Amino acid sequence: MEFEVSYNLDDEQQFWDGEYLKNDYDIARCCFKLLGSTLFSSHQDYVRRQIVFSLLEEDSPDTLHLIVALLIFDGREHEATFELMNAEGIFPRLVEIIYEGKDDDAGLHRMLLELLYEMSRIQRLRIQDLILIEDDFIRYLFGIIEGLSDDSNGPYHYPTIRVLLILNEQYMVSTHDPGPDQPFTANLTNKVIKTLSTHGFAFKTFGENIILLLNRESETSLQLLILKLLYLLFTTPSTYEYFYTNDLRVLVDVMIRNLLDLPSSASALRHTYLRVLYPLLAHTQLKNPPHYKRDELLRLLAMMTATGGAMEVHFGAVDETTKRLVGRCIRVPWLKEHTEGADGESVVAKKLLGVEMPGGMASSLSVVEVTTQKERPGVLTGSREKEEEEELGKAQESEHDVVQITNH
């Protein structure tokens, strides 16, 4: 039986002054008690709205800590909570509290970052809210990561990086894929890219961390967030060389491994990787000799568009988008010159790939195609290696069953 403790309090302030919620566990336990109570279940809409309004009005760190925790836990189970926050203008309030309270309670600050990320990743933010974000706030977020450069596992790294990634996506969506009720905002400045364009030299740790995150992240939606930012960095002249060369080489290794391991069902994610691979190879320091992993890249691209045999079994049927994107990558000058014969004819297209590429393939690479790739939070990217192990296991079980039946 669970041990219960009760307190007799004279008023609300005594609850806060008494420090009954001493740590994150106590706060989480209190939140789940409330969210599971009869009071909450009987009046959910009303209680949620009051909690949201409290966030607009409260300034006490202790009270804010509990309010923010309640909204995070409830919103993860009921997205309508995050949608209500957006409709009621909570986003600017979160930005304000995060920036103005930067020297206050570290635990509260981290949870505010988590709440901002959670409410922003499931919906479009309002244009009027994005416009209010100041350059100083973006630089402040980058500065948090830089200030903790010696502790990549620190509690601030992951929440802060995710906030910057989701803000970049929100800028992209608002500019390149506005909703039916939103005006076209081609002049909306992406302040994440702007900051890296003007101050990228001071915020190198962020770049190192997103490559490390891509290397270990299994959630598809977060991989897409990272790839969207990488795409803009590699297609914006002022950020072509934001990354250190060694970090770019690590990124190439990560992309080769991930492209080889993506299951055949992950075609949209594979296309996004390929859309990022081209500008990575064509625009960054990697275009200069010595050309890193040239042979490995050519083999990978050839394998991805091979028809028939083991390669088609490995990657699945080759779709036209994959052919087009692979063809574009192969036309990166330092790859192309390694695949052309004396007469200039593309050896890769005809021999390695085994397919005819459309002549004079004009680039149809589009920021819109990258922007519109989405996946629901929590969906994990499968692994081809794990799929093959599972299929092998099923085949062995089936063979075992046949043996058992035969023996009987």
Image: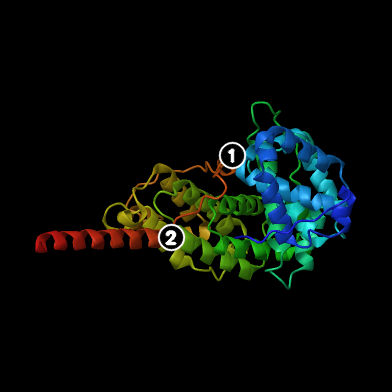
Q: Which residue is mark 2?
A: 261
Q: Earlier in the sequence, mark 2 or mark 1?
A: 2
The answer to which of 93 and 361 lies nearer the viewer is 93
Q: Looking at the image, which residue is at 77% across and 51% down? A: 66
The crowd level at tag 2 (other Cα within 10 Å; few <14, some 14-19, many 20+) is: some
Q: Is label 2 or label 1 in front?
A: 2
39 displayed left or right of 297: right
The crowd level at tag 1 (other Cα within 10 Å; few <14, some 14-19, many 20+) is: few
Residue 20 is situated, as x and y percent measured from the top left of the image, at 80, 59
Residue 134 is situated, as x and y percent measured from the top left of the image, at 84, 46
Instruction: Decide if residue 77 is in sight here.
Output: yes
Image quadrant in which you'd find residue 71: top right
Residue 146 is situated, as x and y percent measured from the top left of the image, at 77, 65
Q: Which residue is mark 1?
A: 368
Residue at mark 2 to residue at mark 1: CA–CA distance: 26 Å
Q: Looking at the image, which residue is at 67% across and 45% down? A: 35
Q: Could you tell me the amino acid type at mark 2?
A: Asp
Quarter of the picture holding the C terminus: bottom left
Instruction: Report if the CB atoms under discs 2 and 1 are less than 8 Å apart.
Output: no
Image height of 132 relative to 99, above or below: above
Please tell me whether mark 2 sits on a helix, a strand or a loop. helix
Q: Looking at the image, which residue is at 78% across and 34% down? A: 128
